[in-house]
Structures are given as structure tokens and as C-alpha cells.
Amino acid sequence: MAGVEPTAPAIGAGRAGRSALNILPRGASLRGILWQAVLLVVVLGLGWWLVGNAERNMAARGLSFGFGFLERSAGIPIGEHMIPYTPADTYARALTVGLLNTLRVAIVGILLCTVLGVALGLARLSSNPLLRALTGGYIEVIRNTPLVLQLVFWHALLLQLPSVRQALNPLPGVFLSQRGVKIPALVAEPALYWMLGALAAGAIGWWLLLRRERARQAATGERRPTILPGLAMLLGLPALSMLAMGAPRVEWPELAGFNFEGGLALSPEFFALLVGLVVYTSAFVAEIVRSGIQSVHKGQPEAAQALGLTPGQKMRLVILPQAMRVIIPPMTSQFLNLTKNSSLAVVIGYPDLVSISNTSINQTGQAIEVIAIFMAVYLALSLITSLLMNFYNSAVALKER
């Protein structure tokens, strides 16, 4: 109709309609909290139902749910243990022995696979075509072969070694036989403890010196040398400790009858597991190191070379600091994989946590409790490893000025 202006809808009508249809709070934060609370209730309810269902099923089979069995005598013979243990000890102590065995192979394996993997990664980028081809072939073969098969191979290879009396002696004090590997060992005594403490103090002193010089470089652009003062602390403090307390004694293995006495014994199972994990994981670490170095723009090493830096300085001061941001996250995953892959020790008879847990389940029938224990242990180990690597990642990360 002419002269009649269209009427605009009431301003609050649309809002009222939407608020009537929307039962949830309009605030995004309140809505998120509500959904999280609902999810938490669902998870807790599901957990309560699962626990109750497990208790009813176990009661129907004459079993009781709980961890009281840990105080009973285990009766499990364990050939390798880092703490005193007899079959008369409790299941709790038996599982502790398995945990320590797992930690031993995991910690040593992580250190060795890092060293070997970095060396292989650098060799993968070598200008020597033969070395580059050999390294590439090694990496491809190892990465594409199942780890279980490799563990069985190394264990079978060690069992083919000669007997104790005909043991191989590739290095002074090192003997290889069907009973494993014998190497010299330092005797646990006060002189050793003082030397290790001095070595740790020297390493901490070198680290503090590096931090101070990095701060000086960031503030003034100048940086004094740290290698010679650091080596002086790292080597000088243990030397002073040995002068004051005496040098630690070294115990050498000697053949006595049908076996060796003295030194450190590495069983065929432990040595095969360690070699298998290190060889397998180092192939992945090598590719991580290679990709991290290649991620640095080619202009960076060219600029370093133009400034007159030596190849070692170029790698240490220019390439690696930029490559570490790419290397550390996947390297953390490989460390976690090595720790979890150590559970394959049951294949070759090494008494790790999973192997002893399986025996405990067979003897007690407390499958849920035992599985919950080693799941919690592996979760804790993974979280601790991730936390330490995240701290290191933060320490070496490139920071803007």
C-alpha cells in the first residue's frame, strides 16, 4: 500500500527465539565446561561398570580382585637380577626385578642407539659414494626387517659362539662365548664413588660455563672459548679425586674351571636384546638426523663457509642448532619405541617386566591387576622420557631476540 512503511521486526524477537531453542548456556566457555563434565561422568560410569563386571566375573571363578597377591611368595626363578632376589621373595620384588631389567636395557639402548644413529645419519650425507651407499643399504635392510626376527637372529648367532674354554678374545679383557660376553668392571668402592662424583661435577661446571658464554654472546656478541676450560673441569676434577682417594680398581675376567670369574657378565639374552634394539632403532634415528640436517637451508652452510668456519664449526655452530628443532620430536618417539619394544624380550627369554608379569599371571590368575601394573609402568616411563626430552627441546630451541 502506498505511503505505508514496512515495519522492522522487533530487535529482541530473534534473540528470544534462539535462546528458547538453545537449552545450553550461550557462553562458549560454559558450554565447554558442561560438555567436559558430561564426558567425565560418562567415563567414570563406564569405569565403575567395568570394575564391577570384572569383580563379578572373578568371583564366579573363585578369584578375588585386589593386589594382596603381591605380598605372597613368588617362587619364580630369575636368572638375571640387579638387586638380591630368591624364588622365596614376593611377587612385588619379582616385578621390581623385571622393572630394573627393563630399565637397564632401555637406558643403555637409548644411549647407544643415539650415538650409532647420529654417526649413520652423518655417513648417509657423506660425499663418499661408497660410504653413502653402504649406509643407505644398511638402513633400508634394518628398517624393513621385523624386530622380532632380528632379535631371534642375534640370539641364535650368540648361541653359535664357541664354549667358554675356546672363548673369543677380540679385545683385552673381553671374552665372547656361548654364555654371553665378559668385560672388565670397576669395583664398587669409595674411590669409584668419589671419581664419579667429580666427573658429574665437572660436567655440570662445563654446562654452567656454556650457559654463561651463551648469555654473554647474546648480550655483547662476544664469546670466549669453552672447550679447553670445559675439558679441564671434566678431566681435571676426576684426576684430583684419584690423586686424593686413589684410582678405582678394575676387575678383569679370568678363566677358572668351566666359567669366567670376575668382571661384568652380559648374558646372551641381554646382549642379543640390546644389540637388536640398538641396531633396529639406530636405523630410524639415522634417517631422522639426515632429514633434520637436510631441512636447514643450503644458504646457511654456504654462509658459514664464506665466513671461514671449519667443517666441524659449521656443523656444530650453524647446522645442528637449526636442525635440532626438526630432530628432537621424532627422536623422542624413537626413544619411546625402544623402551616399549624391549617387551619383546620374552621371545628370547630375557626376564624383563613383561616376561615376569606373564609368569605371575599364570601362577596367580590375577591378570587384570598384573596387566594394570605393567601398563602403568610403561605409561610412567613414556611420560618421564617425554618430559625430559621436552625440557631438552626447550633448552636448545632457537629463541628470538
Image: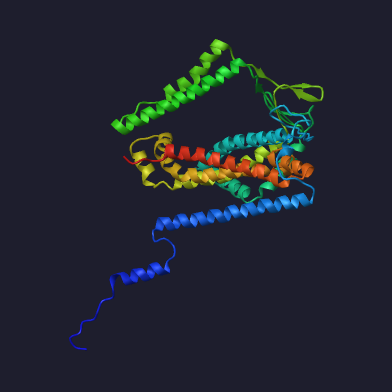
Residue placed most toward the observer, 135 or 76: 76
Residue 256 sits above or below residue 156 on the image: above
Image position of 223 with respect to 50: above or below? above
Residue closest to the eye, 207 or 228? 207
Residue drawn at x 68%, y 45% is 371
Q: Position of residue 313 (x, y in %)?
A: 41, 34
The residue furthest left is: 3
Q: Nearer the viewer, residue 193 or 18?
A: 18
Which quadrant would residue 184 be assigned to in this image? Answer: top right
Give the quarter of the image for residue 208.
top left
Residue 44 position (above or below residue 201)? below
| Front-lying residue, 292 or 107 | 107
Q: Position of residue 26 (x, y in %)?
A: 39, 61
- Screen quadrant of the N terminus: bottom left
Residue 46: x percent and y percent? 61, 55
The quadrant where residue 105 appears = top right
Residue in the picture at 46% in, 23% down: 231
Q: Residue at x 45, y 44 (%)?
A: 293
Give coordinates of residue 348: x percent, y percent: 74, 42
Left or right: residue 320 versus residue 241 is left
Q: Is residue 29 visible?
A: yes
In the displayed structure, would residue 251 be above or below residue 213? above
Which residue corresponds to the image point at 30% horizontal and 32% vertical from the top-left? 219
The quadrant of the picture occupied by the C terminus is: top left
